[in-house]
Image (tube, rainbow, N blue to C red):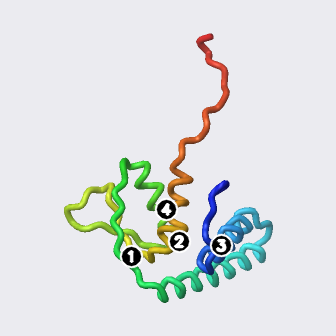
């Protein structure tokens, strides 16, 4: 999230650590490294859950424009071990989740908006001249 000022509370610091650990896990060379990063990831997720329990959670309803947005948002929720759901009769593009306000405002929604941005066009020459 380049160029964006964000608060650096304990939750945000843990999430930054979690991202670094996920990056290390992705390029780990040995089984020992993978196990160490997995244990560190579990410890940080446990601390995040503890912080979430300290702050009251609110039921959020997210209405997303299309299936691509929905898949992206669901992947983000699952990345943070959040189980989305929807009520009977709600559209498939609606996602419900119990979340803390600070997590939504400081982490989840900014990440979603950053990933939702269209990628810059590539400069490939046109085959039609």
| Image quadrant in which you'd find residue 6 | bottom right
Disc 1 versus disc 2: distance between alpha carbons?
12 Å
Name the residue carrying label 4: 109
Q: Are marks 1 and 3 in contact (CB under 8 Å)?
A: no
Near mark 4 (Cα within 10 A), the count class, few <14, some 14-19 or many ≥20, is: some
Mark 3 crowd level (few <14, some 14–19, many ≥20, 10 Å Cα): many
Point out residue 53 in the picture as x, y percentages from the top left corner: 47, 87
Number of numbered discs: 4
What residue sits 67% from the left and 55% below the top? Answer: 2
For the N terminus, the quadrant is bottom right
Q: Which label was assigned to residue 98?
A: 1
Query: Mark 1 against mark 2, which lies toward the viewer?
Result: 1
Q: Nearer the viewer, mark 4 or mark 1?
A: 4
User: Contact, CB < 8 Å: mark 4 with mark 1?
Assistant: no
Q: Residues within 10 Å of mark 1 (few under 14, many from 20)?
A: some
Callouts 3 and 4 close, C-beta under 8 Å: no
Q: Earlier in the sequence, mark 1 or mark 2?
A: 2
User: Cα distance, mark 3 to mark 2?
Assistant: 10 Å
Question: Which quarter of the image is occupied by the C terminus?
Answer: top right
Q: Residue at x 56, y 53 (%)?
A: 114
Which residue is tagged 3?
18
| Residue appearing at x 70%, y 71% in the figure | 21
Residue that label 2 marks: 80
Viewer-proximal residue among 128 and 5: 5
Circle nearer the N terminus (4, 1): 1
Q: Secondary structure at mark 2?
A: loop
């Amino acid at each position: 999230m380049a160029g964006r000022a964000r608060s650096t509370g304990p939750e945000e610091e843990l999430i930054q650590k979690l991202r670094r650990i996920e990056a290390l896990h992705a390029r780990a060379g040995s089984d020992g490294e993978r196990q160490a990063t997995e244990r560190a990831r579990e410890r940080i997720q446990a601390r995040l859950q503890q912080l979430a329990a300290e702050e009251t959670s609110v039921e959020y309803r997210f209405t997303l424009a299309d299936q691509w947005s929905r898949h992206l948002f669901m992947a983000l929720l699952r990345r943070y071990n959040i189980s989305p759901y929807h009520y009977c009769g709600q559209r498939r593009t609606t996602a419900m989740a119990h979340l803390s306000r600070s997590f939504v405002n400081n982490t989840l929604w900014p990440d979603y908006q950053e990933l939702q941005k269209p990628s810059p066009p590539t400069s490939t020459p046109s085959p039609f001249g």
